[in-house]
Image (tube, helix red, strand yellow):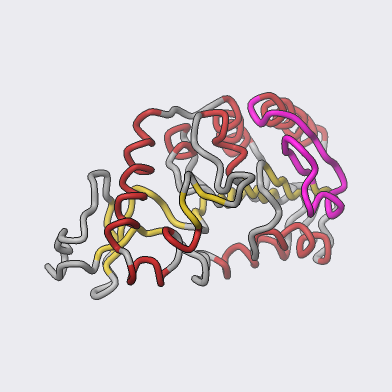
Amino acid sequence: MASLTHPQLVILSGAGLSAESGVATFRAADGLWEGHRIEDVATPEAFMRVPGLVQHFYNLRRAGLKTVEPNAAHRALVRLEKAWPGGFLHVTQNVDDLNERAGAARLLHMHGQLKKVRCTDCRAVLGWEADLEVTTPCPECEQVGKLRPDIVWFGEMPYYIAEIMRALETVDIFLCIGTSGVVYPAAGFARLAAEKGCQRLIEVNLDPTSISSHFTERRHGPASIEVPRLVEELLAYSVAS
């Protein structure tokens, strides 16, 4: 564990962080994702089988980003990032751009980003805000039908795992905001942090989750209220340390 003189802070955020901005949460209680079965829109097999449906689904989600704005929780985390005296890393499972629009810089999107696409042929990764069609050629290699959303689908390896694991080796404070606790490997980060000696593990969520027992502190309530309150507490703690 790192020295508490300059505490190392790692944040994991999930859908609950952006829900109050109007971004739909990952999966509804009926097991559907915005009316679609997960297998129909979020697997490599689906992209091979029905690419038009997959592209349409993500076109709608990408366009939806224009209708939402960062909320108080996003802004509070940026304040924490800028003022925190020790090591800081924010890992998000979210694929929206609300953290960046709030001003986040030390941020890793482990599940990809809606505003990026990648080519399955030449491997180019490109910023993208327009609709993506099956007939859209790759701007780099000009191949048609090879562009896909730069989203980590079920059965694929999340991004930045090595970097995240290194951060969890020396984390002093682990903060988990708005995650369901059912999607791995992210659901195992709290336990790993505790095994590596992290003494303060804080969960912020509307309700208890399947991993709540791994945390030393639990704050239940809307992220827009609980996160700004917690950020002020953490900054006061950092000054007193």
Which quadrant is home to the N terminus?
Answer: bottom right
Residue at x 65% of width, y 64% of height? 184
| Residue 210, magenta (yes or no) | yes
| Residue 45, magenta (yes or no) | no
Residue at x 81% of width, y 56% of height? 198
> Relative to 123, does residue 205 appear above or below in the rendering?
above
Q: Nearer the viewer, residue 114 or 170?
A: 114
**Residues drawn in magenta:** 202-224
Which quadrant is home to the C terminus?
Answer: top right
Q: Is residue 95 left or right of residue 85?
A: left
Q: Nearer the viewer, residue 209 or 104?
A: 209
Q: Nearer the viewer, residue 219 or 58?
A: 58
Give the x, y percent position of residue 79.
59, 31
Asked where in the image residue 45 lies, by quadrant, the reply is bottom left
> Relative to 238, does residue 195 appear above or below in the rendering?
below
Q: Is residue 148 left or right of residue 113?
A: left
> Relative to 140, does residue 65 appear above or below in the rendering?
above
> Relative to 69, does residue 108 appear above or below in the rendering?
below
Give the x, y percent position of residue 131.
23, 47
Residue at x 60% of width, y 37% of height? 17
Give the x, y percent position of residue 137.
14, 62
Q: Nearer the viewer, residue 127 or 173?
A: 127
Give the x, y percent position of residue 223.
66, 31
